[in-house]
Amino acid sequence: MGRSRGGFGTKIHLVTDGQGLPLAVEVSPGQRHESLYAEPVLQAVRIRRHHGRVRTRPKAVAGDKGYSYARVRRYLRRRRIKAVVPTRKDQRRRPGFDKELYRRRNVVERCINWLKESRALATRFDKLAINYLATVKLGILQQYLRKLAPNDSPDRP
């Protein structure tokens, strides 16, 4: 068979709201660095409001140490977004790191783990990244439909 184009692994870059609902997603090859995909996934966020312009900028962004690079921090600072990203070992500690806000990052991790319960996402059968992204988006759509469905449905346990 041979390898898929994404390499051995494919990374999912995901932005969620405070309740764990996905807002934007990007996929990247396993060998590419996370910090290269912070800007594209954040630029893909569009939150509709009842009135006024579409919201595109969150108040804060929490990420793991893979996003602790000057380029990402500059991008967030230019857009006036609070960066809640711990520093790597080879960096100086930044004052004012909000540990309490960083603990909320588990919402994103739980969302990714929920998506990976799907066999197609966990095993990555797709050869092309665009097909894998479509599978991820179908999983996200399934999650939205579960949130919208009433809890007292007779076919649900």
Image (spheres, rainbow, N blue to C red):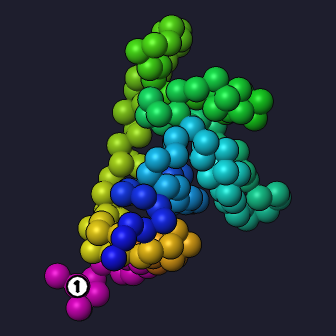
Name the residue type under label 1.
Arg
- Residue for point 49% across, 55% down: 29
Answer whether residue 147 is magenta in the image: yes
Image spot of residue 156 (x, y percent): 22, 85
Up-down: is 35 above or below 92? below
Kindly identify the residue that appears in the image at 44 percent across and 74 percent down. Answer: 127
- Above or below, 56 against 129 in this view is above
Residue 79 point in image, percent of width and height: 75, 35
On the question of residue 90 being in view, the answer is yes
Q: Residue at the location (71% across, 33% down)? A: 75
Residue closer to the observer: 68 or 52: 68
Res 12 visible: no
Residue behind mark 1: 156
**Which x, y percent locates residue 13?**
50, 52
Toward the left, the furthest residue is 157
120 or 14: nearer the viewer: 120
Is residue 57 toward the left or the right of residue 151 in the image?
right
Q: Residue at x 27, y 74 (%)?
A: 119
Residue 106's place in the image compared with 25, above or below, is: above
Outermost residue toward the front in this view: 2
Q: Residue furthest right?
A: 52
Task: Residue 75: say if magenta.
Answer: no
Q: Which residues are magenta?
A: 141-157
